[in-house]
Amino acid sequence: MLFADDILLVDKTREGVKGKLELWRSTLESKGFRLSRSKTEYMECNFSSNRPSEGIVTLGDQVIKVDLKRLG
């Protein structure tokens, strides 16, 4: 069994990240792979503000966790 870890998807907007994540998922699944929704996390880097923005990232209907230990 093959595994790929630590994939980085970057975009300026949360919607852009959601779109790229969904494209990544559908591409993997079309090739017979699957994206582990329970292990997927995201980290937000907002250089124009001192506070994390409110909002969520989803993959399908599942909310993706924020990696809080890397924030702040």
Image: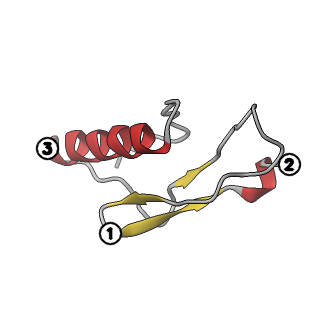
Q: Secondary structure at mark 3?
A: helix
Kindly report the distance in space between the C-alpha atoms of the residues bearing marks 3 and 2.
37 Å
Kindly report the distance in space between the C-alpha atoms of the residues bearing marks 1 and 2.
28 Å
Label 3 or label 2, whichever comes before in sequence order: 3
Residue underneath mark 1: 61
Residue underneath mark 2: 72
Colour option used: secondary structure
Label 1 or label 2, whichever comes before in sequence order: 1
Q: Which residue type carries mark 2?
A: Gly
Q: List x then y, in percent, for residue 69.
A: 80, 55
Nearer the camera: disc 3 or disc 1: 1
Residue underneath mark 3: 30
Nearer the camera: disc 3 or disc 2: 2
Task: Write down the quadrant of residue 23 in the picture.
Answer: top left
Say if mark 3 contacts mark 1, CB within 8 Å. no
Of residue 20 and residue 48, the one placed in the foreground of this image is 48
Q: Which residue type carries mark 3?
A: Ser
Is 52 left, or right, of 30 in this rendering? right
